[in-house]
Image (cartoon, rainbow, N blue to C red):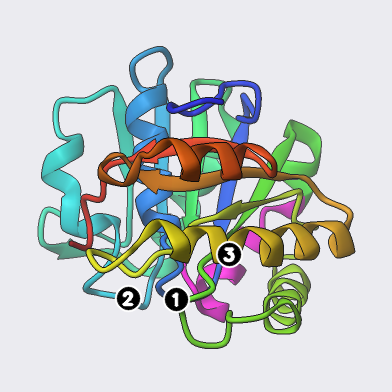
Amino acid sequence: MCMTVPLSFVNRKTNIFVGTAGSGKSEIALNVSLELGEFFNVNLIDADVINFYYNLRSIKHIIANKNINFISTHFDDKSIDLPVLSGRVFEVLSSSNGVNIIDVGGDELGSRVVGQFKELLDKKGYSVFYVANIYRPFNSNEEEILQNMQEIERILGMNITAIINNSHLLSETKPEDIIRSLKIIQNVADKKDIPYILTVVEENLFEEELLEEIKKYSLVYAIKRYIIR
């Protein structure tokens, strides 16, 4: 079992985190970026152009002075329009300097910002990780999650390559809440024929019974929640 991000699952070129609003993809993208930044140059791309409250822009102070190049529609309290964002993203994706982490917003616009670079990404290589939280609206069962995945794939024009289980209820999360999610996420992974690679757990929930149960399905990824408490 792995408590930190396993480098074996990270694509050394581009890693795209997708999911519906509130799934926790921004939180995971940030945690992965902070860990990878200890070893590599990291380009952290915030493609969440709609959500102004729970996104990477709210934690820009955390990545200051880190080995992370942050690209966003909003930075230093200034806004840039989508053509400028697209130009910056193209520049980064075309470069071979660093590992790219892309947080795609839970809306069609954010997906289209990234989807326009499909041809370039096909050449360079990429992974698309679907972040699932069964306690968010319209994600509570296999059918809903599969429908969301299909819609994201349609907009991106790319296939989701793996699933990450980030099921939680913030500070109200109990071990049994995570255990309840495991089979649901595994069934989704089986139906999509993709790997179920990580289950996200905050360290305060670590207990032997929970970790042993997760081990039957995936690796454990311990994160710190910076964006939502």
Q: Which amino acid is tagged 3?
A: Ser
Q: Nearer the viewer, residue 198 or 45?
A: 198
Magenta segment: does it hold 34? no
What residue is disc 3 on? 181
Residues under numbered marks 1 and 2 in contact, where contact means CB atoms less than 8 Å apart: yes
* Mark 2 residue type: Asn
Kindly identify the residue that appears in the image at 80 percent across and 42 percent down.
122
Is 21 above or below relative to 168?
A: below
Q: Measure how far apart labels 1 and 2 are at the Cα level.
A: 8 Å
In three-dimensional space, the C-alpha distance between marks 1 and 3, rounded to whole angstroms, equals 18 Å
Mark 3 surroundings: few (<14), some (14-19) or many (≥20) residues within 10 A:
many
SS for callout 1: loop
Assess disc 2: are there few (<14), some (14-19) or many (≥20) residues with their C-alpha within 10 Å of its C-alpha.
some
Q: Quadrant of residue 10?
A: top right
Q: Do the numbered discs 3 and 2 sit on residues whose CB atoms are within 8 Å?
A: no
Q: Neighbour class for label 1 at 10 Å: few (<14), some, many (≥20)?
A: some
Residue topped by disc 2: 51
